[in-house]
Image (cartoon, rainbow, N blue to C red):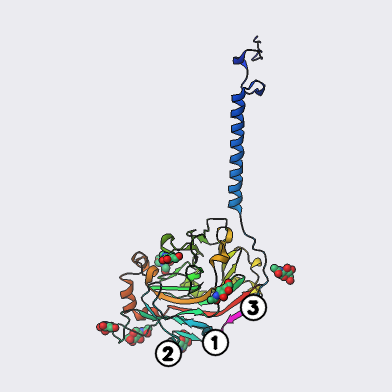
Amino acid sequence: MRGGYGYQLDQGDTLSQPWYNFKYWGKRAWAGFIAVVVIIIVIIIIVAVEVTKKNAYPDYTQLNYSLAETYSGTSFFDNFDYFTGYDPSSGFVHYVPEAQATALNLTYASSSTAVLRVDTSVGPADNPNASTGRFSVRISSKNQYGLNSLFIFDVVHSPLGCGTWPALWLTDPSDWPYHGEIDVMEAVNVVSTTSNQMTLHTTSGCSMDVKRKETGKSLSTSCVNTTSDNAGCGVDAGSTTFGADFNSAGGAILAMELRSAGIRMWQFGRSSIPSDITSGTPDPSTWGEATADFPSTNCNIGNHFQNQSIIANIDLCGTWAGATSVFSENCSGSCTDYVANNNGSFTDAYWEFGAFKVYSAS
Ligand SMILES: *[C@@H]1O[C@H](CO)[C@@H](O)[C@H](O)[C@H]1NC(C)=O
Ligand SMILES: *[C@@H]1O[C@H](CO)[C@@H](O)[C@H](O)[C@H]1NC(C)=O
Ligand SMILES: *[C@@H]1O[C@H](CO)[C@@H](O)[C@H](O)[C@H]1NC(C)=O
Ligand SMILES: *[C@@H]1O[C@H](CO)[C@@H](O)[C@H](O)[C@H]1NC(C)=O
Ligand SMILES: *[C@@H]1O[C@H](CO)[C@@H](O)[C@H](O)[C@H]1NC(C)=O
Ligand SMILES: *[C@@H]1O[C@H](CO)[C@@H](O)[C@H](O)[C@H]1NC(C)=O
Ligand SMILES: *[C@@H]1O[C@H](CO)[C@@H](O)[C@H](O)[C@H]1NC(C)=O
């Protein structure tokens, strides 16, 4: 029977039974309903797992650091080896041994400062000339470091010049890329002022496509050396963090913490150096967000980073600075011709450091 207003149930009249009244559902309807519920539950679980993964973040709880080593003063270079082999980065450079570096004044240390420079003395008409590469220096610390290390680098001047590829970094020179590479400062062909790049390089199984807490800008998230010609997972530290403006501001303090939770780097301008760094009791847990954060979420830091030596060098041309498309952005002609023939253009191509300090936590 149908009433005057809307709808009443007529027993036996299947057509008039409302679909949403489960009392009248058949087996097929129930099966369909259960299937839908199961699918919804599975979707909820997948979303929850993905959200959890996306929010996964390591525990950077406070570590208690104590001073392990200081590189400073007139003995600054004593605890470094001078690399003299063929340049692994295919640069247009002859890395000279210690005696020649000292004679050419390419490394120089006083009580307050250590300088590492590119040679400017060899002109195109000299014999020998720089037609097969210019003299430069690459030093690596004799001591090597692992997890629970905190490095404080006082950098007063960053190198400038067409063709230059300076870096302050760490790796195990005898086991690259298996023991990893940590680039704290790196830039190429700096003619004015530019951004510092902080980068990791590893073997397979290290990605930064995860939650991070950093003020810098991620440039690429695969750290694996076979991705994009070994570009690494770089972070742009921000404008004026390398080059002329950096230098005229007196440089900065670069801090790098290596621990199983992750690798973090900070770049502090002279006016914003945390007081615990100045007082020699650095505590990264009080510094706020890092400039570059490489959490361990998708990268086993202890496996990928071992036996790290501190390295400072100035390469010339090579696979990055010398790439035509890169060189021509700010400089003209061929990189190697430029480097061979313009000795007077490398007077600003030098690193100047204050002290390097390494702290360790047990
Ligand atoms: C660090 O030192 C503080 C204070 O001395 C202490 O409470 C804390 O447990 C220590 N942390 C570690 C990881 O040793
Ligand atoms: C070597 O370089 C340092 C730093 O630039 C400079 O102060 C010093 O005068 C140079 N020494 C010589 C002998 O040129
Ligand atoms: C460049 O080389 C020429 C020739 O050797 C030399 O006279 C000049 O002083 C050099 N320039 C610099 C900046 O060292
Ligand atoms: C530069 O040196 C190479 C040998 O190292 C020599 O063959 C060449 O003639 C030199 N160039 C000049 C301009 O003296
Ligand atoms: C290249 O020149 C441009 C324009 O002057 C400047 O913005 C940029 O920072 C320069 N790059 C380098 C590496 O010096
Ligand atoms: C990457 O590392 C492997 C060793 O794992 C090496 O054989 C290869 O040449 C490296 N490739 C680049 C582009 O660095
Ligand atoms: C590399 O580091 C490990 C500990 O991480 C150490 O046992 C080993 O002796 C180191 N190797 C070298 C060559 O320093």
Disc number placed over residue 75 in the picture, else none: 1
The amino acid type found where label 1 is placed reads Ser
Quickly name the residue at label 3: 67
Residue 136 in picture, x, y percent from top left? 41, 80
The residue that appears at 60% across and 40% down in the rendered structure is 42
**In which quarter of the view is residue 271 placed?**
bottom right
**Left or right: where does residue 176 sit relative to residue 288?**
left
The one nearer the camera, 240 or 86, is 86
Q: Is residue 153 visible?
A: no
Quadrant for ligand 3 reads: bottom left
Q: Is mark 1 within 8 Å of ligand 2?
A: no
Quickly name the residue at label 2: 103
The residue lying furthest to the top in this view is: 1
The one nearer the camera, 212 or 200, is 200
Badge 3 element: strand
Mark 2 near mark 1, Cβ–Cβ under 8 Å? no
The residue that appears at 57% across and 56% down in the rendered structure is 211
Residue 102 in picture, x, y percent from top left? 45, 88
Indicate which disc, 1 or 3, sits on the residue closer to the N terminus: 3
The amino acid type found where label 3 is placed reads Leu
Indicate which disc, 2 or 3, sits on the residue closer to the N terminus: 3
The residue that appears at 52% across and 75% down in the rendered structure is 309
Q: Which range of residues does the magenta coloring cover?
A: 69-73
Q: Quote the CA–CA distance across marks 2 and 1.
A: 16 Å
The one nearer the camera, 343 or 134, is 134
Q: Is mark 2 within 8 Å of ligand 2?
A: no
The amino acid type found where label 2 is placed reads Ala
Quadrant of image for the N terminus: top right
Residue 295 in picture, x, y percent from top left? 58, 61
Is disc 1 surrounded by few (<14), some (14 to 19) or many (20+) residues within 10 Å? Answer: some
